[in-house]
């Protein structure tokens, strides 16, 4: 956890109340808090920082669907960016769609040169967090990767360190973001809305934390156009992965006061730029 993130983190159950680092924390040469305890001044809940990662969920927060459970497994976290993720968008869109096409698109839509805090929500290994941190260069502010699966953020931290990027990782739920209302310049979410659980609560949280001039950039999957594709999606639905028709996806955005500013579809892959309504 970098000091820039610590200064902004709030209690997930009382998101207007800041968290404070208790005395006795250990910090490494880069200024990262490696071990310590965060406390909420109001509800007195204590949250550990272990190996540089703040855990705001604790051991009792369990995944609710088979898809989420898979992501709690260390082998999934290890394999994710080493196998599936680099090919994912080409396979799902039906056209060449490597990182060299996807990541500049995310960075451009986010306008990450603006100062402030940028979140990669449900970040897995932090692919979008790294793209944003790289695109931001030395701009004032900070990038934070959030996921509820500890092995995912642990892997994310390793990737960020290998790339020499200053990114903080937090274990937290997309439905209870540990940031104050209006405090975030940008929220990115790549592919996670489909398996997020309570989609309206996750979008409401995204909207709550966004600053009035904030931007949300989402990549997710929608209902397939072909019968075979829809059949496969129905099977995945039993595992807790939802594939909405475009109209329903956009209704979810509108219901949560997120205004659709631009949208592109490639196969079942959709990129959306959302602004506060
Ligand atoms: C498809 S992967 C996301 C990939 C990543 N954003 C990317 O673009 O490579 C889905 C991720 O969402 C996380 N996730 C699912 N539901 C979540 C929730 N309610 N809160 C936080 N993380 C969640 C999973 O642990 C998993 O790491």
Image: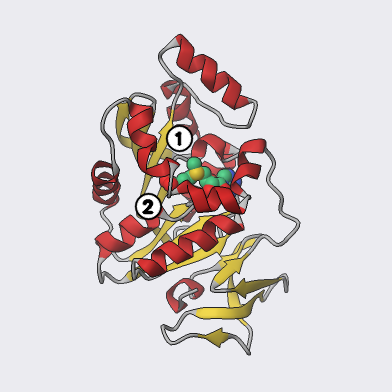
Which quadrant of the figure contains the C terminus? top left
Q: At 31% from the left edge and 27% from the top edge, which residue is drawn?
A: 266
Expressed as whole percent of the image width and height from the top left, the position of residue 233 reads 53, 22
**Cβ at disc 2 under 8 Å from ligand 1:** yes
Instruction: Indicate the quadrant where residue 260 lies.
Output: top left
Tell me if mark 1 has few (under 14), some (14-19) or many (20+) residues whose alpha carbon lies within 10 angstroms of its own.
many
Residue 186 appears in the rendering: no
In the image shown, does 160 or 171 lie closer to the viewer? 160
Q: At 66% from the left edge and 37% from the top edge, which residue is drawn?
A: 66
* Residue matched to label 2: 128
Question: Residues under labels 1 and 2: Cα distance?
Answer: 20 Å
Looking at the image, residue 149 sits to the left or right of residue 227; the answer is right
Quick one: label 1 or label 2, which is nearer the N terminus? 2
- Examine the rendered structure and indicate whether residue 185 appears above or below residue 36: above
Tell me if mark 2 has few (under 14), some (14-19) or many (20+) residues whose alpha carbon lies within 10 angstroms of its own.
many
Looking at the image, residue 36 sits to the left or right of residue 81; the answer is right
* Residue matched to label 1: 253
């Amino acid at each position: 956890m970098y000091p820039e993130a610590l200064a902004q983190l709030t209690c997930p159950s009382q998101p207007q109340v800041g968290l404070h680092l208790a005395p006795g924390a250990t910090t490494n040469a880069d200024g990262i808090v490696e071990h310590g305890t965060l406390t909420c001044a109001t509800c007195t809940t204590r949250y550990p920082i272990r190996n540089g990662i703040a855990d705001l969920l604790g051991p009792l927060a369990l995944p609710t669907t088979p898809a989420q459970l898979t992501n709690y497994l260390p082998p999934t976290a290890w394999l994710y960016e080493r196998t599936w993720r680099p090919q994912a968008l080409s396979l799902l869109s039906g056209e060449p769609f490597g990182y060299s096409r996807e990541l500049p698109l995310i960075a451009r839509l986010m306008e990450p040169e603006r100062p402030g805090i940028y979140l990669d929500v449900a970040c897995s290994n932090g692919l979008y967090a790294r793209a944003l941190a790289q695109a931001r260069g030395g701009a004032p502010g900070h990038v934070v990767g959030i996921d509820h699966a500890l092995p995912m953020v642990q892997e994310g931290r390793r990737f960020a360190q290998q790339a020499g990027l200053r990114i903080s990782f937090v274990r937290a739920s997309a439905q209870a973001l540990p940031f104050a209302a209006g405090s975030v310049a940008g929220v990115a979410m790549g592919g996670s809305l489909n398996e997020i659980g309570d989609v309206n609560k996750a979008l409401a949280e995204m909207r709550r934390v966004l600053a009035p001039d904030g931007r949300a950039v989402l990549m997710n999957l929608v209902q397939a156009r072909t019968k075979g594709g829809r059949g496969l999606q129905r099977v995945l639905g039993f595992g807790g992965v939802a594939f909405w028709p475009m109209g329903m996806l956009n209704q979810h955005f509108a219901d949560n006061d997120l205004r659709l500013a631009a949208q592109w579809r490639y196969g079942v892959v959709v990129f959306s730029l959302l602004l506060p309504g």
